[in-house]
Image (tube, rainbow, N blue to C red):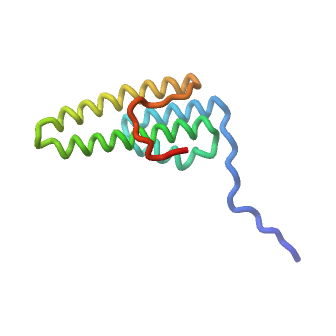
């Protein structure tokens, strides 16, 4: 009696190009409100669904981790009275660059943030 065990892990079906653009855009916009969490969850869950969404979630995660680093630097320099300026500048850059990246993702274009440390490489 040879029973074959079904594969417990099945490769997820790839997204259509419109779904890839939608999810990439949502990950970029989610970073404005929830910081690195949408990018992290998106990268872990969606990276096998297509090259476009994989690259955008990786790029967004790298940028949001860079933003987190900027917030930490601003927090530690609050006593120098420049921390508030750093935190405000990082918040503005986060909003502006995330919106630009979301627009690029919605157009189906590849986007690289101008200011981002590559914590996670391809």
Residue located farthest toward the right when viewing the structure as drawn: 1
At horizontal 22% and vertical 40% (from top left) the residue drawn is 74
Q: Where is residue 12 in the image (x, y as percent from the top left)?
A: 67, 48
At horizontal 26% and vertical 45% (from top left) the residue drawn is 72
- For this rendering, which residue is in front, 58 or 4? 58
State whether residue 28 is above or below residue 40. Answer: above
Quadrant of residue 98 in the image?
top left
At horizontal 46% and vertical 37% (from top left) the residue drawn is 60
Q: Where is residue 117 in the image (x, y as percent from the top left)?
A: 40, 40
Quadrant of the frame with the N terminus: bottom right
Please indicate whether residue 25 sits to the left or right of residue 3 in the image: left
Query: Total of numbered circles in the picture?
Result: 0
Quadrant of the frame with the C terminus: top right
Please indicate whether residue 79 sits to the left or right of residue 67 in the image: left
Residue located farthest toward the bottom when viewing the structure as drawn: 1
State whether residue 43 is above or below residue 88. Answer: below
Please indicate whether residue 46 sits to the left or right of residue 82 in the image: right
Quadrant of residue 114 in the image?
top left
State whether residue 99 is above or below residue 68. Answer: above
């Amino acid at each position: 009696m040879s029973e074959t065990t079904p594969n417990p892990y099945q490769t997820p079906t790839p997204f259509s190009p419109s779904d890839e653009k939608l999810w990439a855009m949502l990950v970029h916009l989610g970073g404005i409100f929830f910081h690195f969490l949408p990018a992290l969850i998106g990268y872990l869950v969606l990276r096998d669904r297509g090259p476009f969404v994989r690259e955008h979630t990786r790029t967004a995660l790298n940028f949001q981790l860079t933003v987190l680093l900027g917030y930490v630097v601003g927090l530690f320099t609050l006593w120098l009275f420049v921390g508030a300026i750093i935190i405000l500048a990082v918040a503005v850059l986060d909003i502006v660059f995330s919106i630009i990246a979301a627009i690029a993702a919605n157009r189906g274009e590849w986007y690289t943030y101008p200011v981002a440390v590559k914590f996670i490489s391809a």
